[in-house]
Amino acid sequence: MHKRFRLIIAGIALVTAFSACSSEDSGDTASTTTPATAVDGSAVPTTAADAEAAAVVEVMDMSFKPATVTIEAGEAVTWEFDDGGIPHAVQGLNDNGMELSSPILKSGPYTHTFTAPGTYEYICPLHPQMKATVIVK
């Protein structure tokens, strides 16, 4: 619970800081061959190093697209962050989703392997209206 609270507080602070700054468009796009870097400059952890994703979720236009994906247990989902420099994260909800927690990213991929069947609901803790689901069979 404390980790989630700190993530939400850090996210609010980052959103406030970024809203005061103008964004720079370098024309570069995120690539799965380039490791993602968290907003704080740290490397992005992954639970599926170099895993082939069974599903890809685009994080753009202040939403997760598609909002629901279905995979098999042991398969991975990759989130591709590309929302014009707006920071987002993936944070699991309820008991099933607590293992799902990405760093705050403005671009690049984050991959997570789901080992147990279940329904995993998640949000962007910076923008709680952004909600989606991974169904693992």
Image (cartoon, grey):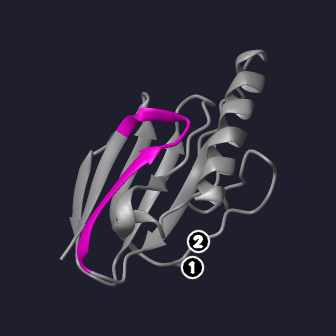
Q: Which residue is mark 2?
A: 46
Q: Is residue 16 above or below residue 88?
A: above
Residue 24 is left or right of residue 114, and the answer is: right
Residue 93 is left or right of residue 24, and the answer is: left
Q: Residues within 10 Å of mark 1 (few under 14, many from 20)?
A: few
Q: Residue at x 58, y 71 (%)?
A: 46
Quadrant assignment, res 126:
top right
Residue type at mark 1?
Answer: Ala
Q: Which residue is mark 1?
A: 49
Q: Which residues are magenta?
A: 117-130
> Is residue 124 part of the magenta span, yes or no?
yes
* Residue 127 in sight here: yes
* Residue 24 in sight here: no
- The image shows residue 81 at horizontal and vertical percentages of 53, 45
Q: Residue at x 62, y 49 (%)?
A: 5
Disc 2 or disc 1, which is closer to the eye? Answer: 2
Name the image quarter holding the C terminus.
bottom left
> Is residue 47 part of the magenta span, yes or no?
no
Q: Residue at x 55, y 56 (%)?
A: 109
- The image shows residue 123 at horizontal and vertical percentages of 42, 45
